[in-house]
C-alpha cells in the first residue's frame, strides 16, 4: 500500500496538461503515492449543474491531500447559458469549485511564495523572495450577496447606519450588495501562520497589508489583531501598509519586503502582482492549507485557447508540487525538486513559450526530471 493517497484533479483546459507534466516529475522523484483521479470543472457544471460533484468531495475525504490543475469560471449569466437544456430554469447557480473546496475543508491559509530564480528572463529583479499569506475563507469570498437587495435588509441597514441614507431613494432592483465578512479568529489564524513561517524560515519581517483608514471595521480588526500577535514574536518586526501603497512599493522596491499577510481579496490582488515580479503566472504556485487537509494548485487559469496544445509553462505546477512535498514533510524530495527547477531555469536551454522559448510542456517536465 502506498504511503500517501493524493487526490488528482486536473480540472479544465491546461489543468490537464500541467498535471500530466507534474506526474512525470513526481514519478522521477519516486514519491510513494497513489494518485486518485477526481472529477471537477466546467464540464460537470454544464451537464450536472455542479462543478464540484459530491462524489469528488467524498474522494477528497479519503485522501491525504490534493494536487489541482485549473478551473474555468464564468459570470452568473454566462454560466447559466451553458447549462444543459434539461437543467435550465431549475435554480442551479454556479459557484467556483475551488472557493467551495476552501470553505468545505476550512483551508483557511493560502500560501503563495513568489521567488525569482536566476536566469529567468521574465524576472523584474533576481533578488525578489516574497511569501504572501492570504486568508482563504472569508472577506468578499464569503458568498453573502444580494441582488436585488431585499427590503428587510435595506430596512436594517437604514436603521443602523447613517451612510445608507444616500441610497434611500435607490430602487432595490438597482442595488447589489456583497458583504465583506472578517472574523477575529480568521485574522488571528492567518497572522499567526505568517509569523510562524517567518520564525521557522528566519525571514526578516512580516508586513500586514490592509486599508484601515477607509475600511475601518474589517481592515481595522485585522490590523489590531496583527499588532497583538506581533508582540509574541519580538525578533520579527511588523510593518503595516495600505493595499494601494503596497502595490506601488512592490513595483519600486520589492526586495525590501519579505512575508506579506492580508485578507482574502487583497491577498488575491497582491499575490498576482508579486507573481508578475518573478515571471508571471507560469511561476505562481499556491497551497490552500487547513488543519487536516490541503489542496495545492498553480494560480493560473484554465487558458482554454492553449488546452491540449502541450504548450504552457508547467513550472507553477511543479512549484505547487514542491509545496505539497513540504506539507507532507518530504523535505528532501521538496528541496531536490526546487533545485532541479532552478537548474533548468538557470541553464536556459529548455524554455516554454512565455519565457521566449519553444519547448513543450512535456519537454520542460522531462528536463526537470533529468536534473533530478
Image (spheres, grey):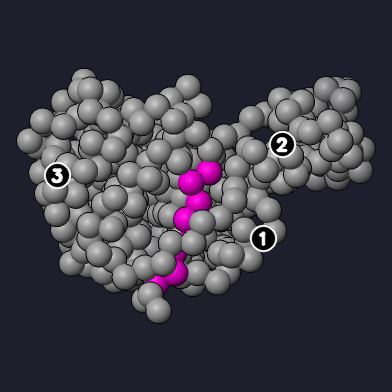
Q: Earlier in the sequence, mark 1 or mark 3?
A: 1
Would you name the residue on which mark 3 appears? 342
Task: Please report the residue visible at 43 percent of the width from the left and 62 percent of the height from the top.
Answer: 35
Residue at the limit of the structure toward the right, as seen here: 151
Task: Please report the residue visible at 41 percent of the width from the left and 67 percent of the height from the top.
Answer: 34
Residue 112 lies within the magenta run = no
**Camera-nearest label, 3 or 2:** 2
Report the Cα–Cα distance between label 1 and label 3. 38 Å
Q: Which residues are magenta?
A: 4-11
Q: Main secondary structure of the magenta part?
A: strand
* Label ID, residue 55: 1
* Label ID, residue 46: 2
The residue nearer to you, when weighing 350 against 176, is: 350
Q: Earlier in the sequence, mark 2 or mark 1?
A: 2
In this rendering, does residue 337 appear at all? Answer: yes
Q: Are marks 1 and 3 in contact (CB under 8 Å)?
A: no
- Circle 1 residues within 10 Å: few <14, some 14–19, many ≥20: few
Where is residue 211? Give x, y as percent.
Answer: 48, 39
Q: Quick check: 258 left or right of 207?
A: left
Q: Are marks 3 and 2 in contact (CB under 8 Å)?
A: no
Q: Secondary structure at mark 3?
A: helix
Report the Cα–Cα distance between label 3 and label 2. 40 Å
The residue nearer to you, when weighing 171 against 334, is: 334
In this rendering, does residue 118 appear at all? Answer: no
Q: Secondary structure at mark 2?
A: helix
Q: Quick check: 48 left or right of 306?
A: right
Amino acid at each position: 500500500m502506498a504511503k500517501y493517497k493524493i487526490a488528482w484533479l486536473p480540472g479544465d483546459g491546461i489543468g490537464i496538461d500541467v498535471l500530466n507534466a507534474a506526474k512525470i516529475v513526481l514519478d522521477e522523484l519516486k514519491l510513494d503515492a497513489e494518485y486518485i483521479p477526481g472529477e471537477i470543472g466546467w464540464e460537470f457544471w454544464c451537464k450536472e449543474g455542479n462543478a464540484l460533484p459530491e462524489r469528488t468531495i467524498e474522494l477528497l475525504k479519503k485522501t491525504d491531500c490534493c494536487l489541482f490543475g485549473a478551473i474555468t469560471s464564468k459570470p452568473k449569466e454566462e454560466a447559466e447559458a451553458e447549462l444543459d437544456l434539461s437543467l435550465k430554469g431549475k435554480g442551479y447557480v454556479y459557484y467556483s469549485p475551488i472557493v467551495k473546496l476552501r470553505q468545505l475543508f476550512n483551508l483557511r491559509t493560502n500560501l503563495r511564495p513568489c521567488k525569482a530564480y536566476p536566469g529567468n528572463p521574465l524576472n523584474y529583479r533576481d533578488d525578489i523572495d516574497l511569501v504572501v499569506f492570504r486568508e482563504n475563507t472569508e472577506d468578499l469570498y464569503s458568498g453573502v450577496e444580494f441582488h436585488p437587495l431585499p427590503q428587510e435588509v435595506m430596512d436594517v441597514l437604514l436603521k443602523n447606519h447613517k451612510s445608507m441614507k444616500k441610497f434611500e431613494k435607490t430602487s432595490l432592483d438597482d442595488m447589489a450588495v456583497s458583504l465583506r465578512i472578517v472574523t477575529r479568529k480568521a485574522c488571528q489564524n492567518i497572522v499567526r501562520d505568517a509569523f510562524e513561517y517567518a520564525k521557522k524560515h528566519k525571514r526578516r519581517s512580516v508586513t500586514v497589508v490592509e486599508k484601515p483608514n477607509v475600511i475601518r471595521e474589517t481592515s481595522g480588526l485585522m490590523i489590531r489583531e496583527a499588532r497583538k500577535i506581533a508582540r509574541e514574536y519580538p525578533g520579527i518586526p511588523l510593518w503595516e501598509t495600505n493595499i494601494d501603497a503596497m502595490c506601488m512599493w512592490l513595483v519600486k522596491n520589492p526586495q525590501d519586503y519579505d512575508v506579506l499577510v492580508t485578507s482574502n481579496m487583497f491577498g488575491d490582488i497582491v499575490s498576482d502582482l508579486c507573481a508578475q515580479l518573478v515571471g508571471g503566472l507560469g511561476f505562481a504556485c499556491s497551497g490552500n492549507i487547513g488543519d487536516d487537509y490541503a489542496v495545492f494548485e498553480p494560480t493560473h487559469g484554465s487558458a482554454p485557447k492553449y488546452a491540449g496544445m502541450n504548450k504552457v509553462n508547467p513550472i507553477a505546477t511543479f512549484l505547487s508540487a514542491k509545496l505539497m512535498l513540504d506539507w507532507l514533510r518530504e523535505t528532501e524530495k521538496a528541496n531536490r525538486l526546487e533545485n532541479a527547477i532552478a537548474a533548468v531555469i538557470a541553464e536556459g536551454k529548455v524554455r516554454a513559450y512565455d519565457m521566449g522559448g519553444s519547448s513543450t510542456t512535456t519537454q520542460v517536465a522531462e528536463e526537470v526530471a533529468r536534473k533530478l
